[in-house]
Amino acid sequence: MVGLKLLKGDIKFMEEVRIRIELADKGQIKIINNDECLLEINADSKMTINGEEIFKTLNYSTNKKYVLEKLDDNHDEALKRKYEATQKLHKFYEDLLSDINKLNLDDDLTRSIDEFE
Amino acid sequence: MLNSNIRVDLHIHSRISEYKEADGIVEDSVFENIDVLLTKLNENKISLFGFSDHNRFDKNLFKEVKEYIELEDTKTKYPHVKNLLPVIEFDVIFEEDKKKCHVLAVFDYKSDDNLDDIERVIESNKLTNSEQAYERDEFEKIIRDIGQDVILIAAQRKSLDNPRGGENSLSDSVDDIYEFLKVGYISTLEVQKSAVQGMILKNLVDFPRQINFVSGSDCHQWEYYPKHSKNENFKDKNYYFTVKAQPTFSGLVMALTSPESRFDRAETINYPYIQSISLNNQEIRLSHGINTIIGENGSGKSTIVYGLLEETNTKDGKYAKKILADNKFSVYPSGLSSNIFGVRQSEIINNSKNGFIFSEKENYFQRINHQNFENNIMEYSNKLFNNISNNIDIETSLKQISNLNFTIDLDFEDRQQYYIQIIADRNLSDSNIHQKRLIEINDILIKIIKESQNDYYDNESGAIWLKIVSEVSNLRNKIIKKYKERKGEIYVKNIISSGINDYTTDINSLIGVDDKKTSSYNKAKNDFKSLILNHVINLKTKSWEDINFPNKINGQSTKPHRGYNFIKIARYSDEDLSELFYEKVFKKEYRSIEKLKEIKDEKKFAESILNANEKNYEETYKSKISTLIKELKEEDTYIQKAGENIYVGSTLGEQSLVFYDYMVHEEKEESIIIIDQPEDNISNTKILSDLIKKFSLFRDQKQIILVTHNPMLVVNLDTDNVIYLQNINGKLMHKSGCLESEGIISLVAKTMDGGVEALERRYKIYGRS
């Protein structure tokens, strides 16, 4: 099984992508990918998001592990409605990333090889 | 026709030599004792002989003996003895201050007038003293005055560079013996001892033409033939020479001008051959050696070939069959057809036009295995096609999400519903992400199993292969497990999804307006997410797979056989095909991976492929690939002389020569070879330098029957038998014989283009006829 061992050595651990949703002081909702803000949305209780833009905030490439950081609940009472909207966006991301992670794990052949050994 | 060798002794003395033989040894060598000589000659199987007296000619003796041996009784009594020729042994001093030399002058005998001329000239130039000799001028004048065709044979009793001993030898008589031989002044040398022959051959190693020596008994005392006389120490003396010729002057000329085909011929043959054919109840005997059939166009030459080859199925064959039947054609002995190898130059030419001179049934070449090439090109082209299709899918899903907006609305987010909304997961429809890997590992496993079964591997390697197969199978099972799980999941989800749809339909009819709004909001959100996921799946499963154009593949086979390499080369062999591949499939502006990567929709894809439209581009692509593979699999065949890196030329002539060369070297079982017009497309120079040599190699090995228009083949090949055919109003007439037979030479000269030139070339040194 020499060949497979080498193969295993070559496989990198999946890169972690950290996504954070933030409600900024001035009320903008920011989507931050590994410390880089990829989308800023001005929103109130109604918030329109574009599919491609959301996709881009993932900075997607195959075999990454997405981690959604906890939503910070320190917020001004005045921004309550916005915070609630942010929570909904957070929930949306949570579902989306969970599905993507599931796909990634499914596709990960390293597990097969681990099991195999 | 020539079918057997004859023994010749042209050096026998009679009493007329007595002026030089004082000891009386020729006393009894007179006509009265001719039976003594003939008995000895017959015992020794001498067919052609000559009285060769010293500077004398006994016309009466010659005439008497000639008449005597032609009597039927004599012929019965001495069956081996066939003919005699007038010969004189001259003493000649060729150069001043040199010793004299013995020269045998052999004359033709056509009528008694010839004899009178010889006697008259000799008598008027008679030497009286036994020590006397003719000077060169005198000698040449005598020959000229006799005015007949003559063959001059000089005595040589020692090696050419030995100044001592060996009396009366040419080498003591002239400064430059090579010159005498080269111009043909002297036809050959008479050498009696084998050892001396060997030494002279060594002296003549660089001589430009083959010389075969003759021998004679120099018998003076007939009673003791083949001894010189009673007291000679006979040991090791060659007293005759053997040639395949008619026992005539012409036969002798032929033998001396074609020593390679007339001397040293096999005494017996041990292969079956066609002994005769018959036309209109007339027998035409064939030689077991080389036979040529000549005649004008339409004289029936090729018809005879059809008959000999028993080819009567083709259109021409059927026509020939009729003519042959009309002319009562038959072959003796019959039943030799399996011993016949027949070839027509026209067939070679046709085969050559189709790529190779040998007919297909002849398995000269080794098959090339194109599987690797085909697999590689198919794999590459499939992957390329998939890559582009995948790019299009990815672009399509990207476009979908870029046009898609969703508004998160808190009013709906928190709204309570009076029923449970279940939303079908539309991502997990039919995409099984394990499928691709499963296909790949299946391919790998098939390849491994196939290779492991190759006979090449021994038991030890076989065991290693078994392990590999088993491990890869295990890995495949893991993937199958996942694939099945996913398949099951999709299956179940599909059922659930269908149930959900039914449920949703049912619920929709029951719920109020607000609930409907909430429900459709939730569905829209889920669809929004699903489309993003769908794009992710596309990216995961349909990303551009790096592909490299297949490496150069060797598509060549070489089969060495009998001094030639028979080589097949497929067009793709060792060629970098990437440029050609793109050229044959894609339009100019798309002929690179980079350009193809830029294709993002079907319209562009269709546009990139030559002669394709949006409806048929996939089909067109595939058909172009298979055409390309077919074209590249085409094979060229070459023949290479082993050890030489040059391919045999492509002209028909050159290829034909290879055919014949190969035929010569191939141990064909057939003992009879029939060739129809081998000279077509071969230049006269090549006929002289190559073809004749090749056919000569068959001499005494096989019976050859050639149909030819080329006089050089007839004359220079020195064929043993010439059959001249004529077609007179459908009746096939013939005349046949060997080259020296009466009338045959003139037929060759008359009926064949260039016949006269071919003969002149050969006879230029032999008198005027």
Image: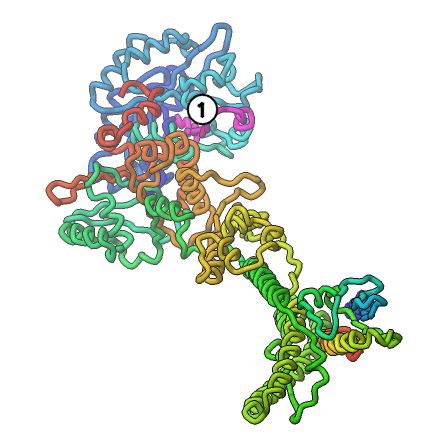
B392 left or right of B673 in image: right
Q: Main secondary structure of the magenta part?
A: loop
For the question of whether residue B453 can be seen, the reply is: no
Where is residue B76 drawn, in percent x and y? 24, 42
Question: Which structural element holds mark 1?
Answer: strand
Instruction: Report the quarter where the N terminus of chain B lies.
Output: top left
Decide which of B647, B470 is in the foreground and name it. B470
The picture places residue A71, in percent across and down from the top left corner, at: 84, 75
Mark 1 is surrounded, within 10 Å at the Cα level, by few (under 14), some (14 to 19) or many (20 or more) other residues, namely many
Front residue of B623 and B296: B623
**Among all residues in the image, which is located at the extreme left?**
B729
Q: Is residue B484 above or below residue B21?
A: below
Q: Is residue B336 left or right of residue B376?
A: left
Q: Position of residue A41 (x, y in %)?
A: 75, 66
Which residue is disc 1 drawn over?
Answer: B189
* Amino acid type of the residue that numbered disc 1 sits on in the rendered structure: Leu
Picture layout, residue B203 above or below residue B670: above
The stretch in magenta equals: B200-229
* Residue shown at 65% from the left, 75% from the top: B530
Seen from this angle, which residue lies furthest front? A78
Q: Is residue B433 left or right of residue A75?
A: left
Residue at 57% of width from left, 17% of height from top? B164
